[in-house]
Amino acid sequence: MDPIAHNRKAWNAQAMKKNRWTVPVDAKAIAAAREAGAQGGVPEVVLTPTRAVPAAWFGELAGARVLCLASGGGQQAPLLAAAGAQVVSYDLSDEQLARDAEVAEREGLELTCVRGDMRDLSVFTAERFDLVFHPVSNVFVDDVEAVWRECARVLVPGGRLLAGFMNPDVFAFHDAVLDGRPLPEGASMLAYRVPFVETRDSDEASVARRVKRNEPLEFGHDLETQIGGQLRAGFVLKDLFGDFWEGGESPLAKHLPAAFATLSVRAG
């Protein structure tokens, strides 16, 4: 099974089921984003589950050429467009892009939607964008280093990469711990070693269950890849925060951050 092909199908299905990351923002949110942009500010958007991105991370947003990378779903891309950015939404899922297009049409926004794999941005010329907005999504691909290299290629020197990614520690725990279920007899709470590849490391029953439910398959990347990979691609790390996913969807949420976000700038 090709996990990336499966994940395209799975996210199309998640959009049809109205997963929380597939529900478009309403007119009130767009109006607030327009007002923020008119005053030289930025809309409230997230790279991680709950914590808003600091306004200072965006620099000058009005007129900026922004690539919303693997962030379809009618949420971040339309808000950034409403605030005055020139936005391209690039996503693997047809249905997620359709949510972005739906909001753009409804609200009269200029927003370009392109379908593709986040590991391959060859459809875009070098130095095409001023900012890449990449919320937690590289958990669904195997090669994060390729994502960072492509981000560096399409950004201008001094361009900003705003990225969210899962805390790799989460992937060390058995699926049952994450789901709040009792551990199977004889199983260990700490079951896996990161980097984690679900189709390789998780038990067959768990993988089969996710495939049957049309749930995306995941890859747990270590910090050497997530942060070190950005540095090797030519970025300079400027800031970082963790998000605990308060009130969260996992029993681990009260003990450790579910995700991190970074602000990096392309050197050169």
Image (cartoon, rainbow, N blue to C red):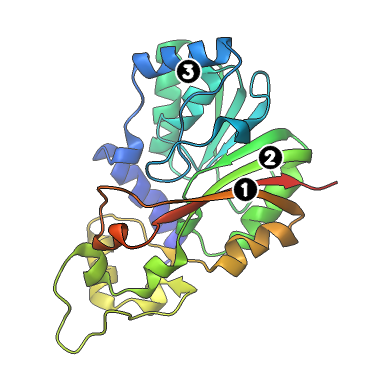
The amino acid type found where label 3 is placed reads Ala
The residue where tag 1 is placed is 239
Decide which of 245, 84 is in the foreground and name it.
Answer: 245
Q: Position of residue 69 (x, y in %)?
A: 56, 41
Q: Give me the C-alpha separation between circle 1 and circle 2.
A: 11 Å
Label 3 element class: helix
Report which quarter residue 49 is drawn in.
top left
Tell me the residue that label 3 is attached to: 33
105 displayed left or right of 191: right
Q: Quadrant of residue 234?
A: bottom right
Q: N-terminal of the two: label 2 or label 3?
A: 3
Q: Secondary structure at mark 2?
A: strand
Q: Residue at x 15, y 68 (%)?
A: 181
Q: What separation in Å lies between label 1 and label 3 (alpha carbons)?
A: 24 Å
Q: Comparing marks 1 and 3, which lies closer to the viewer?
A: 1
| CA–CA distance in space, label 2 to label 3 | 20 Å
Position of 158 with respect to 86 (left or right) is right
Element carrying mark 1: strand
Kindly report which numbered mark, 1 or 2, lies closer to the viewer in this rendering.
Answer: 1
In the image, 145 versus 122, the foreground residue is 145
- Decide which of tag 1 and tag 2 comes sooner along the chain: 2
> Measured from the top left, where is residue 208 in percent x and y?
25, 69
Indicate whether 52 appears above or below 171.
above
Q: Residue at x 66, y 54 (%)?
A: 148
* Amino acid, disc 1: Asp
Q: Which mark is residue 160?
A: 2
- Three-letter code, disc 2: Arg
- The answer to whether residue 109 is visible is no
